[in-house]
Image (spheres, helix red, strand yellow):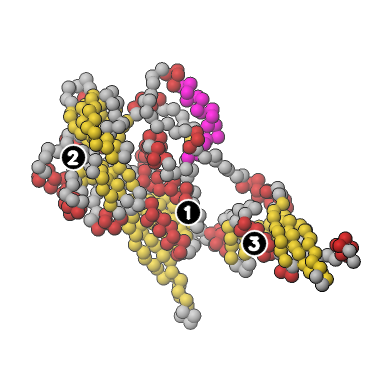
């Protein structure tokens, strides 16, 4: 027979399924890989293609040449594959044929989601994250890191407490992986405990619930610290009065008077822990009267002598202060800067008392921390960007005064993001739905008010923002129900 006659009379796709059902969990977005394994796959991904090919019965009798997706409406609950196979039909005669297999996506809850729906308190492991400070800006930053790296994907529930957050998991390995992620991004220490829930003495099976207590270092960005004598000695006898300039897996500290920088990892810090002697709530606004650069630099910082006066002293007295700062690249006469009024601060710290008794040099009257863009803050321009939030539920009702305090902390965190390009480079920022309109309106506000804001304000640019993709789950469910 000729080739055309063979094609007409022989069907090498006979015995191969042309319509297959696959199961999909709507709650967690995973597909069932028989017998009991659930796999997370994106539409038209390699993982989904592999899963679909394995579901086609009879395909092993032929040689698979090619397989690709055919576009279908995302809400149709149908997936189509164009498959090309080869098979030997006669001696030394190989026939190639292309056909389409349709997969019907059938909704089915996975075991984990079924447990959650039937009993929300069901969990195997819990990570209790705490920090002993009077603000929540560290948690706001950590929340954005978790969202960016999708470290929360295995959680079954997240609860917010006044002093921290609890993360619940269905597997101990997921909790361990989350704790490892925390170790990689912030200085923490953790403890593990377990509680016996039930056991079967005949089969020797034991069921435990695991708890991971994680404590974050109380030292935060822009905090003033005074190192204990033991730690200062290990740093070569450097000045124990330091500023915390950055928090990562290390605590980055710097002497603002000499630009000497040191880092502490989690092990070193928790071996000799110490608390900050000043935090961002104690910052005072200073007006810069004169700046004299001294030459030495360290990265973005430069050493300079400055003459300043407290904003609260203007019109009351003529007290001025002379000192040294690491902000020589940022400040010029007439600028505002936030700093610690060291001469008038009350301390309850043994390291500070020891420093005052044994210091051979005069302690500073002030320590500047960062430039303050006061004109920009007066205008209250609307933001054309936003942040995403973790799906948390409150463990207990928040009081009104605590709500106001949290809102103020969140606003300060947003201001830190606006003022520090390095900080916002670590997280994801998204456009608001009316970003272009808000940006044009903000420019109009600037022109109407007439007062110019600081020229060196590190404005958030549109090209730094991501598009916010939101899916309507209700529409998906309606379409899926219609197909069933």
Q: Nearer the viewer, mark 1 or mark 2?
A: 1
Which sits in the foreground, 422 or 131?
Answer: 422
Label 3: how many Cα within 10 Å (few below 14, some 14–19, many 20+): some
Q: Earlier in the sequence, mark 1 or mark 2?
A: 1
Which quadrant holds the N terminus?
bottom right
Q: Which residue is mark 1?
A: 152
Whole-angstrom CA distance, mark 1 to mark 3, is 25 Å
Q: Is the residue 170 above or below the residue 420 in the image?
A: below
The answer to whether residue 281 is left or right of residue 432 is left
Q: Is residue 247 left or right of residue 54?
A: left
Disc 1, disc 2: CB below 8 Å?
no
Q: Which residue is mark 2?
A: 346
Of 344 and 102, the residue lying toward us: 102
Q: Residue at x 31, y 31 (%)?
A: 330
Assign a secondary structure to mark 3. helix
Which residue lies under the disc numbered 3? Answer: 51
Report the side of 91 relative to 449 (left or right): right
Which stretch appears magenta? Answer: 429-445
Main SS, magenta region, reads helix
- Point out residue 455 in the picture as x, y percentages from the top left corner: 38, 25
Q: Position of residue 389 (x, y in %)?
A: 47, 45
Q: Is residue 452 magenta?
A: no
Taking the spot 31% from the left edge, 45% from the top edge, the residue there is 220
> Cα distance, mark 1 to mark 2?
41 Å
Residue 299 appears in the picture as rendered = yes
Vertical arrangement, residue 60 with respect to residue 463, above or below: below
Sequence-wise, the earlier of marks 1 and 3 is 3
Q: Nearer the viewer, mark 3 or mark 2?
A: 3
From the viewer's perspective, tell me whether residue 34 is left or right of residue 364.
Answer: right
Which is nearer the N-term, disc 3 or disc 2?
3
Residue at x-position 60% and y-position 45% = 471
């Amino acid at each position: 027979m000729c080739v055309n006659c063979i094609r007409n009379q022989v069907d090498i796709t006979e015995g191969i399924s042309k319509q297959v059902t696959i199961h999909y969990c709507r709650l967690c977005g995973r597909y069932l890989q028989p017998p009991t394994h659930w796999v997370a796959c994106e539409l038209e991904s390699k993982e989904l293609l592999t899963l679909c090919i394995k579901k086609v019965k009879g395909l092993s009798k032929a040689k698979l040449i090619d397989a690709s997706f055919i576009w279908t409406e995302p809400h149709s609950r149908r997936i189509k594959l164009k498959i090309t196979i080869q098979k030997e039909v006669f001696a030394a005669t190989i026939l190639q044929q292309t056909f389409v297999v349709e997969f019907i996506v059938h909704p089915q809850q996975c075991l984990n989601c079924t447990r959650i729906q039937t009993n929300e308190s069901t969990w195997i492991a819990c990570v209790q994250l705490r920090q002993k400070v009077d603000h929540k800006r560290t948690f706001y930053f950590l929340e954005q890191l978790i969202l960016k790296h999708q470290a929360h994907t295995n959680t079954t529930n997240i609860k917010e407490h006044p002093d921290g957050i609890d993360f619940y998991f269905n597997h101990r390995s997921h909790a361990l992986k989350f704790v490892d992620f925390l170790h990689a991004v912030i200085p923490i220490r953790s403890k593990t405990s377990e509680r016996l829930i039930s056991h079967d003495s005949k089969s020797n099976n034991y069921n435990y619930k695991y708890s991971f207590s994680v404590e974050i270092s109380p030292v935060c960005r822009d905090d003033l610290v005074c190192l204990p004598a033991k730690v200062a000695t290990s740093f070569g006898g450097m000045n124990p009065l330091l500023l915390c300039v950055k928090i990562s897996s290390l605590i980055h500290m710097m002497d603002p008077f000499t630009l000497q920088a040191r880092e502490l990892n989690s092990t070193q810090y928790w071996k000799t822990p110490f608390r900050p002697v000043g935090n961002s709530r104690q910052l005072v606004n200073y007006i810069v009267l004169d700046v004299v650069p001294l030459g030495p630099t360290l990265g973005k910082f430069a050493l300079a002598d400055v003459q300043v006066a407290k904003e609260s002293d203007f019109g009351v007295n003529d007290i001025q202060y002379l000192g040294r700062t690491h902000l020589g690249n940022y400040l010029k006469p007439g600028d505002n800067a936030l700093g610690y009024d060291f001469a008038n601060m009350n301390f309850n710290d043994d390291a500070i008392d020891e420093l005052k008794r044994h210091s051979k040099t005069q302690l500073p009257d002030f320590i500047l921390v960062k430039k303050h863009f006061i004109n920009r803050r007066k205008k209250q321009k609307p933001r054309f960007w936003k942040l995403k939030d973790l799906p948390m539920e409150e463990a207990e009702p928040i009081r009104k005064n605590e709500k106001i305090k949290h809102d103020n902390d969140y606003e300060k965190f947003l201001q830190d993001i606006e003022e520090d390009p390095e900080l916002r480079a670590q997280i994801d920022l998204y456009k608001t739905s009316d970003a272009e309109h808000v940006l044009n309106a903000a420019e109009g506000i600037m022109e109407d008010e007439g007062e110019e804001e600081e020229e060196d304000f590190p404005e958030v640019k549109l090209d730094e923002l991501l598009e916010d993709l939101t899916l309507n789950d209700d529409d998906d469910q309606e379409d899926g129900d219609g197909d069933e």
